[in-house]
Every structure is written in C-alpha cells, then in structure tokens.
Amino acid sequence: MTLAKGVVFLAIAGLLASCSVYERFLPSSEDRPAQEFSPGENLVYQAPDRWTMSYDKKTDKHWMTGWTPEDQERDSWQDMLSIQVVYNATSKNPVQFIKGMAKSAEKACPGSKGKIWEEGERDGYQYVIWFHDCKKNPNTQQMEVSILKAMLGSDNFYVLQRAWRSEPSKSDLEQWATYLKKASICDTRFESVACPK
C-alpha cells in the first residue's frame, strides 16, 4: 500500500495539483542548527523529535514532504505528518479549501466525518484547523484520523496534516492541535511578521 491510497492525502493531492511549491523545514531537536530562512515568505514549524522524512516530492507547481516515526515505513505508516507548500496560491481561502477537502474526503471514504476545529488569523494570515475521521478507508481497509491546518500567506498556501491509522487519544489530538497552532508564516520583507532569529 502506498501513501497515495490514504483518503485524506488523496484529497490534498487533488486539491493542490494545480499549484506550486517551496521547501523549508526545521530540524527536530534543539541541538541541530536553527532554521535558516530564504528571502521572502517562509513556513515556520518544527519537525517532531524521533521522526524522519519518509518522502520529499517537488514539482514546478508544489512541494510535499512527509514524516513518520523512526520505527515506521512510508508504505506501512501508522502515524504521518505531511507538509505541503503551494506557491502563488494566494487566491485560495482556507475555509473554502477545507470545504473542498471535506467533499473529497466524503467521496473517498463514505460516512466519514469532518469538522472545523478552529479558524482565525495569526499575524494577519488566515488559517483553519480541521479534524477528519474516516472509520475505514476503502483503499487501505484501515481507520484514518487526521487534524490539518491550512494557512494562506501573502505569496503561498500552506497545509500541515497529522494523520493516524488508529484512534488517537483525546490528549494526543490536543497535543497535535497545539503543535499545528504553533506553525506559522514569517516574511523577511516585513518587520511585522519577521522570521525568528
């Protein structure tokens, strides 16, 4: 089984197919070098400790990366963090994006449930955090639960998603919701949203 068979990942891939990408990530542990920022807009986040990059795909339209715990493989993952950066996608609206995700997810996993966990604005950038529960993905025959954050930057559109193939505990969901809330956008061009030093 491949990652592409995951219901939520299929939905994201379909919705992002017409956009473009950029790579920027922060190493997982504090003893690694601080994140370096390219000129312009950047995604600020921290890769989880003891997780490794399981895939990294760039096209002229988008960039996607996936992370799994060190003891899991890409094709048999039980826990996944995926990140997509879509360039020049400023016409996307996070709420509309989530509505499109919900329709795609329902089609791929009949009976699945999704809800907006939180929506708002941080440093002038709109975001939405969305929860999705698929009791049994027809392609993988496994449960898939995910919590996703979509953010609209001045230049790009960003999606971070934490997915499970088992029922996460309430505390695990809350911990990852907090993790996603901390992910942000910075821009070297503007002091009001300056990148961390």
Image: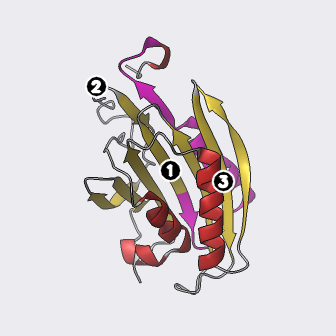
Figure quadrant of residue 111: bottom right
Find numbered disc 3 in the image and state the secondary structure of the residue it sits on.
strand
Viewer-proximal residue among 175 and 160: 160
How dense is the environment of label 1, judged by Cα within 10 Å: few (below 14), some, or many (20 and up)?
many
**Quadrant where the image shows the N terminus:** bottom left
Residue shown at 52%/84% (left/top)?
140
SS under mark 2: loop
Q: Is residue 108 visible?
A: yes
**Mark 3 crowd level (few <14, some 14–19, many ≥20, 10 Å Cα):** many
Cβ atoms at labels 1 and 2 below 8 Å apart: no
The disc label shown at residue 23, or none: none
Q: Amino acid at mark 2?
A: Pro
Residue beneath label 1, please? 160
Residue under pointer 3: 130
Residue 75 x/y as whole percent: 39, 77
Name which residue lies at 33% across and 57% down: 53
In the shown orientation, is residue 10 left or right of residue 67? right
Residue extending farthest top: 191
**Callout 1 secondary element:** strand
Q: Position of residue 76 (x, y in %)?
A: 43, 78
Give the CA distance from mark 2 to mark 3.
30 Å
Question: How far across and how far down the image is residue 7, in percent?
Answer: 55, 74
Question: What amino acid is at disc 3?
Answer: Trp
Q: Circle 2 is placed at which residue position? A: 39
Q: Is residue 47 left or right of residue 181?
A: left
Magenta extent = 162-191
Up-down relation of residue 22 to residue 15 (above or below) = above
